[in-house]
Image (cartoon, coloured by chain):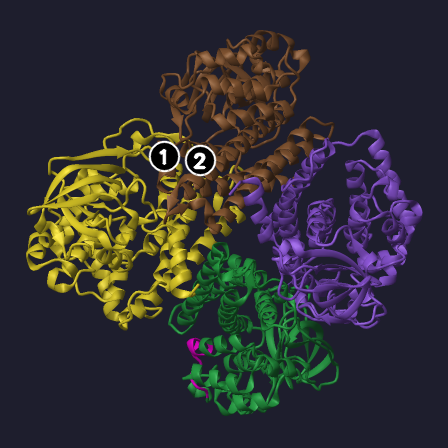
Chain colours: A green, B brown, C yellow, D purple
Amino acid sequence: MLQDSVQKFVHRHYSFDDRNAIIDSGSGYSEQCWQLFAELGWLTVPFREDDGGFGGLATDMMVLMEEFGKAMVVEPFVPTAVLGGGLIAALGSAQHKEQHLVPLMEGKLQLGAALYEASGRYNLASVGTTAKRDGDHYVVSGSKILVLNGEAAQQLLVSVRTQGAERDEHGISVVLIDAASAGVHKKAYTTVDGHRAAQISFTDVRVPVANCLGAEGEALSALRRVVDRATLCVSAEAVGALDMLLQKTVEYSKTRKQFGTAIGTFQALQHRMADMFIECQLARSIVVMAAMKLDSDLTEQEKARAVSAAKSRVGRAIRKVGQEAVQLHGGIGITNELDVGHLFKRVTGIETLFGNSDFHTARFASL
Amino acid sequence: MLQDSVQKFVHRHYSFDDRNAIIDSGSGYSEQCWQLFAELGWLTVPFREDDGGFGGLATDMMVLMEEFGKAMVVEPFVPTAVLGGGLIAALGSAQHKEQHLVPLMEGKLQLGAALYEASGRYNLASVGTTAKRDGDHYVVSGSKILVLNGEAAQQLLVSVRTQGAERDEHGISVVLIDAASAGVHKKAYTTVDGHRAAQISFTDVRVPVANCLGAEGEALSALRRVVDRATLCVSAEAVGALDMLLQKTVEYSKTRKQFGTAIGTFQALQHRMADMFIECQLARSIVVMAAMKLDSDLTEQEKARAVSAAKSRVGRAIRKVGQEAVQLHGGIGITNELDVGHLFKRVTGIETLFGNSDFHTARFASL
Amino acid sequence: MNASFTAEELQFQEDARQFLEAEFPKDIRAKVEQRVRLEKDDYVRWQKILYKKGWAAPNWPEEHGGTGWTAVQKYIFAEQMARFGAPEPVAFGMKMVAPVIYTYGNEEQKKRFLPDILASNVWWCQGYSEPNSGSDLASLKTSAVREGDHYIVNGTKTWNTLGQYADWIFCLVRTDNSVKKQEGISFLLIDMKTPGIKVSPIYLIDGTPEVNEVYFENVKVPVENLIGEENKGWTYAKVLLTHERTNIAGVPRSKVRLEKLRMLAAQTADGNGGTLSDDPIFKNKIAEAEIQVLALEYAELRALAAVSVGKAPGPESSILKVVGTEVAQFIDELYMEMAAWQSLPFVPDQFVEGFSGEEIGENGEAATALNYFNNRKASIYGGSNEIQKNIICKAVLGL
Amino acid sequence: MNASFTAEELQFQEDARQFLEAEFPKDIRAKVEQRVRLEKDDYVRWQKILYKKGWAAPNWPEEHGGTGWTAVQKYIFAEQMARFGAPEPVAFGMKMVAPVIYTYGNEEQKKRFLPDILASNVWWCQGYSEPNSGSDLASLKTSAVREGDHYIVNGTKTWNTLGQYADWIFCLVRTDNSVKKQEGISFLLIDMKTPGIKVSPIYLIDGTPEVNEVYFENVKVPVENLIGEENKGWTYAKVLLTHERTNIAGVPRSKVRLEKLRMLAAQTADGNGGTLSDDPIFKNKIAEAEIQVLALEYAELRALAAVSVGKAPGPESSILKVVGTEVAQFIDELYMEMAAWQSLPFVPDQFVEGFSGEEIGENGEAATALNYFNNRKASIYGGSNEIQKNIICKAVLGL
């Protein structure tokens, strides 16, 4: 079982101190852990069997991500395997897959997906980065924000406009760009929740036409599908982290004494923990819903609606459970010393990833 | 002091049982109480001194209405004195005032303002009722919903369109229509909160041109000002009623025993009552704000913003405090036997009157 | 548990739909759509049709007349019922006393009572709550004193829903005052025609006499009407309270109401020349409610899935009660907000059968505030939401 | 109390504005606008300018250097300060220890400490909380044992804000273990340079070393540093906690932040070709925050008006704390939501003086999540919001 496998891994390799050391390391993730991910087969989970993967079921990714969420795993599973690998699997030719998915699943390739721009907010169709044809090359120019794993990524999946005006639904392509290409400029940083990302600009970067994934100009719907899968993944990750926040809070309330008694005996706090439990259960339920629907034969629209419903609802749970966990811990909850503060930061980060609650509620209503 | 004066009146004449009997009576209000209102000078409060009134200060109306709210007074003070009288005071000629404000303040005239239409929601400019000129008369046709005090009103203040298309800001006039005129059809009823109102249709009703208040077609801004004053009044009424709901709930929690102890000792319920108290205080504060601004020399826009802020915030307090008061009372709170259920119904009614929270939040943001 | 149904399940869905289309009486359906209050006869007539079909009691064991459906089938059926507005059976007989009888009653009692419940020949009501025992149900005081082969019952029961129609009442009564409060309670079935019983209506704030107080003055009840052992009634009642949680969340009804709300919003003028569907704030609220119902639906399916693999329905069902009632009450608010001014007229007559006057409001607008008022009860009864949170704290969080 | 100011008040407003325009250092203002963290020198320099003007301590009694302003003037001044982003004095000296000294200190102590506080010559910090005494402050354990003309202090204080800059610390210490916990506490002033004191930073989740733990190991404190009577310290501390509530609600700051938010929203792309100002949901949230701040402002004015007619500041001030922190935290959320993706980079360097690299995000977007994280403290410290609710229940509702 995936769940057992992650729990064993976490028990052996991923204590809170391990994680802090990994974040403080140069690369911001553990290459050793990453190789274990590969050995344990986790990197194959997002891929269908005919692509050499484990099956590509959303319900499997959900299980994996939930456990990652509990331990606050920072290794770039989502950017490399779900987003980057997902785009190649969805759009790429047999050759693209052969060339990239195999090393990816073996743990030898890091990817990053450069999909969002400063003026585009959460809109994947808002692509100002251009790719102009020049013989058998594209010349790519533009700038992308918050490319997850952008620093370590050897290859970048970049959404570019090969035609049309900003925000046109057509004319968007995804091209593979070697991160070492001339004209690629990265500004790397750690995110508030301990992951690595980069702002990446492209200045007249020459990219072979063969690096375009799928039909030129028609990448948007695949892009949305892949990002929806990533959205489901981070939602599931949040569910794991929220459960942990609740568990830590309940435990703390049983030991922390104030006014001569454990604070967990105060009914006002008890009912707030009951509310946190309810939020956690609803978040888990709606993520189960979305994962099942992604694995079903429903229409694309219904699947997108399901993911947006999940991300919206999980976002509300994040706000509520995260804030309450910190509040009930009191001062110690806002220090870097305890895992609670880090869980809080991670779920808050997830709240923003791929669109916050308001964005997804509106998307749900409009689909 | 107005406050003392109302408190004494309530003590003598307006117990919960008195009120129930009044609501069940034919007219739905007490003529005897109304005469006391006149004797005690309350009917002069909304009017300026040069109109023969007490001063017309919003802060005075606020004090009066808050006390009315505590006792759930159903007499038609707002429809007759604030809305109807207010429109005459704002728009009418000296003769109109002489003819109507004097008897009004003496308690001899009941008014109703017919301002809203089924397709207009809370928009005062949405006037489909037409007044077509025919010699020295208008011929009025159309239909108005929820005319407060519509049954008892001898004269109706009706917003009509003398020009332009539905929802045009210009072309709206207010005419005085004798309720006994041919073509006036009333469908009267009690409202959910124990007041009286009517749906009124006008079929080719002939109205002398002299009954138009102010310049033809230019009534909208005065209409809005007067309705804003009425909005302030019912907001203040809600503040009184909410305070009462809190007080009743706290008292009940001290006597009601469950599991061998007064429920007021349960901390989860205590904190919810603290939250109710906070809501009550914020509601009171923002109504004070709006009343003071109405009495100041701020611009009309700032005054309208203040009233919308108050109504919006009071609406949220109504939802929260009303629901919590009922919930903490348990079953007895949803029976007609206790005053709590009636206070809950009244504040819920107020939540809708002249626009609910969402309407006023949007109006606040747009002004 | 799966996001999409199997072919057999889809077939069952279609069967249920066709049955409802053909057999659910048109006049009752019209009443529901026009929000006319249903009378005793409406309930009984429809229930007898279900009985004839063999679908009266999906949750009963098959040996007593249950349908033998899977959890998913029950779910599908509940959803189809909600879609047609078909009233569920009044719970007191079918869902409350019957499980106690078939679980704890003797053979004689099973034979005597169950067939009439299944066939809707007898209307039952509930005698649990008392004026001074709300959430603290076990503090009840109604006494039953054994005299020969009878109990003599004295006391008052309250929040007795639709007791005005009832033939029988099941009561928790105190048979021993000398022990811990939970240990002196017995479960008694009482014929409402017994001398000494008086039913008196309590008017709720929506103006309806939906509940009653029931007074017992020296009411003689034969000993054979005792369920199980004397002084063990609390155990039976408690088991009942945690079982029979199917559809406690009210998901199908909330779904249907939200669909209708969305449809009505598209027909309701926003006062600016458009409809409420153009109002982003209102649209957002509907979406949030829909999302909440989706989350709740899968919380229920997860609970059902746990039950179907043999786990007892756990304290998680407390969540279904809390969230189910909260979202239903939120939908009440949305209907009221949509109706705006038209929520204010109090015109109960127009929702009673035979009304022929001029109506106020369209699409039942004038009922929206009344529904809102009435349904505040949902978070109070059936174990108040506060009690549910206590259960979560104790049984799940270990606090 | 009035919705509009008098002519004199308007004149005062203009004077305050002109003073700030002319005297508030441009470099500090620029730092504030660019969200660069202020250093000790920035606070002290600005505070000394206020001192020179005679406006350093609006809330002190005039005899000790206060301004003698009316409540309205104080309000106007606070609003103008917020408008310019001028930092308020660090509270520990000016607002916390000084009132205790001028109320309960002896003449010697007043002469020795107050002038240096007023002139910002000495930086004070607070020694109240301890690792095991959060909201239950009176359970503190740091001991002070009298030996001759000194106390020997041992223990640990925590949540010591900006203690790394401090010259002096005021502490609650336990001087009697044999009595009720509140009755054995004394109020002691301690020179931070005394041997045996160690300050160790605690990093908050925004990555800043804003607070510290302070360890006392056999620290010798002269007896003349005791305020008032031994074992009466709790009384002094409690009075302090209910006084000095001016501007506790943070209305001026919240108003200015909302104005700025509105302005920035109009410049922030919504991803659909418009700006966030076109987003009805976001606009609605801003409006709700503005309305809440308006309500809070008048709640505070009502409290001030009550004080100005001689009433003691009552437990109502608990509301100001609760709502003031809640709305400030809600505004933090709105800033973070506005920044969207740009709230995620953790780039503390770019908010430290002297940063010259390429910035991430515009208008301090990259600080928004950090501000959100940091300001979660607001509902925890200064008497947590739960404690404030306890106060309301006890002192106002009589529960």
Identify residue for label 1. Answer: C205
- The answer to which image quadrant residue A348 occupies is bottom right
- Mark 2 belongs to chain: B
Q: Disc 1, disc 2: CB below 8 Å? A: yes
What's the amino acid at mark 2?
Phe
Q: In the image, A25: left or right of B139?
A: right
What's drawn in magenta, residue-wise? A53-61
Q: How many labels sit on residues? A: 2
The answer to whether residue D272 of the structure is visible from this angle is no
Which quarter of the figure has residue B4?
A: top right
Quadrant where the C terminus of chain B sits is top right
Which numbered tag is attached to residue B344?
2
Give SS at disc 1.
loop
Vertical placement of residue D380 versus B365, above or below:
below
Foreground residue, A17 or C252? A17
B266 over B48 or under it: above or below: below
Going by the numbered disc 1, the residue's amino acid type is: Ile
Label 2 sits on a secondary structure element that is: helix
Q: CA distance from mark 1 to mark 2?
A: 9 Å
Coordinates of residue D238 in the picture (x, y in percent): 68, 49
Confirm whether the magenta stretch covers residue A339: no
Q: Residue at x 88, y 40 (%)?
A: D63
Where, quadrant-wise, is the N terminus of chain B in this rendering?
top right
Side of C171 where B217 appears, left or right: right
Q: Is residue A56 magenta?
A: yes
Q: Chain of mark 1?
A: C
